[in-house]
Amino acid sequence: MENLVIKKFQDIFKDKRILIIGNTGFVGSWLSLSLNFFQAKILGLSLKMKNNKYLSNSKEFQKKIKTIYADINDFKHFKNKIKKFNPEIVIHLASQPIVKTGYIYPLETFETNIFGTIRILELLKKMPSVKQVLIFTSDKVYANKKRKIYTEEANLGGLDPYSASKSCQDIISQSYAKSFFKSKKMIILRSGNIIGGGDWSENRIIPDIVKSYINKKILKIRSINSTRPWIHILDVIHAILLILGKKSNHKKRDDLIFNLSPSTSRQVSVKKIIELIKENTVIKNIRLKIVNRKFSEKKYLNISSKRAFLKLNWKTKLSLERSLKLTINFYLTKKKILINTAENQIKEYFSNKLK
């Protein structure tokens, strides 16, 4: 029984030509390894990550996953290589993903997240081999004016540069779906805050906690009472696989936009996350310093994944406590066995052994 899920996804993805744009980042590297596990043919297109601790910078990853190192804004350098690969599925993850960076570098954020996406979509609309396009936007695309739970029908309208750029990316993708992709299935995912080993981005709470622990430094916190929908990377990947494997009428566009989040009871504050890490992981002592925010952030961000449950029979399998334990343990794993550890987690998750 345990191997039926693995067999199901192997039957769907074996030998499928899948282009992952942004495959060297946190989500992209885990997704690349997962699809490789299910025997898909992967081509990655991405910038090389500067921090050597990323999974994608390991020799094992680079042997398994063929990657074109390029900037999506530098279109002419990868256009012909994508055409030659002739992808059937394209997953677009590449973006400037940090709220604070959006304030510091707004032009670059808009250029990458908006015009980079347009360049990709312009290429894909001329490629008959492409049957499915999945765009990864954000839970921050919503016009968050009140403390409420947002469904996929809620108004879009992020205001800070990062959120605004992702709102635009979302709307533009919907526009291309309706205007140009009538023979292609366009999927939009809006995920909550993704946790899991291997994210070394600046100004993210879990990486910051790990770095403060490793370096024995005080953890600086901006918004300790902010509430977020925390979700493990493997639960996100499970949703992606279910969506890509689902037979559906792609002309009914509304059914192809999904929020991904845990139940509302698991959408907790940063303060609660810190408490849970101390209770459930080897990190028992976290020295905190509350610092003033120099930019605006949403205090509450609660999204509903009821549609994913009803249409895909998807929900998070990993408890928040288990997710945090897996995450922290992964960060503290020796570099030489990281890929092994990641692949074991993928196999155990889809064999229903991670609970």
Image (spheres, rainbow, N blue to C red):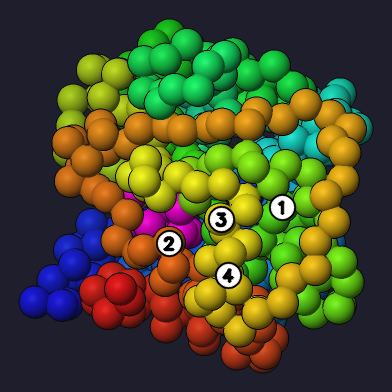
Q: Earlier in the sequence, mark 2 or mark 4?
A: 4
Q: Earlier in the sequence, mark 3 or mark 2?
A: 3
Q: Which residue is denoted by mark 2 in the rendering?
A: 320
The amino acid sitting under disc 4 is Ile
Residue in view at x 74 percent, y 22 percent: 160
Q: Assign the N terminus to one quadrant of the image.
A: bottom left
Image height of 22 relative to 107, above or below: below
The Cα atoms of the two marked residues, 2 and 4, are separated by: 10 Å
Instruction: Between residue 7 and residue 216, name the one nearer to us.
Output: 216
Residue 132 located left or right of residue 93 = left
Magenta segment range?
231-239
Which secondary structure lies at badge 2? Answer: helix
Q: How many marks?
A: 4
The amino acid sitting under disc 2 is Leu
Q: Earlier in the sequence, mark 1 or mark 3?
A: 1
| Mark 4, other Cα within 10 Å: few <14 / some 14–19 / many ≥20 | many
Q: Which residue is denoted by mark 1 in the rendering?
A: 204
Residue in view at x 23 percent, y 17 percent: 252
Image height of 15 relative to 186, above or below: below
- Of badges 3 and 2, nearer the viewer stands 3
Which secondary structure lies at badge 1? Answer: loop
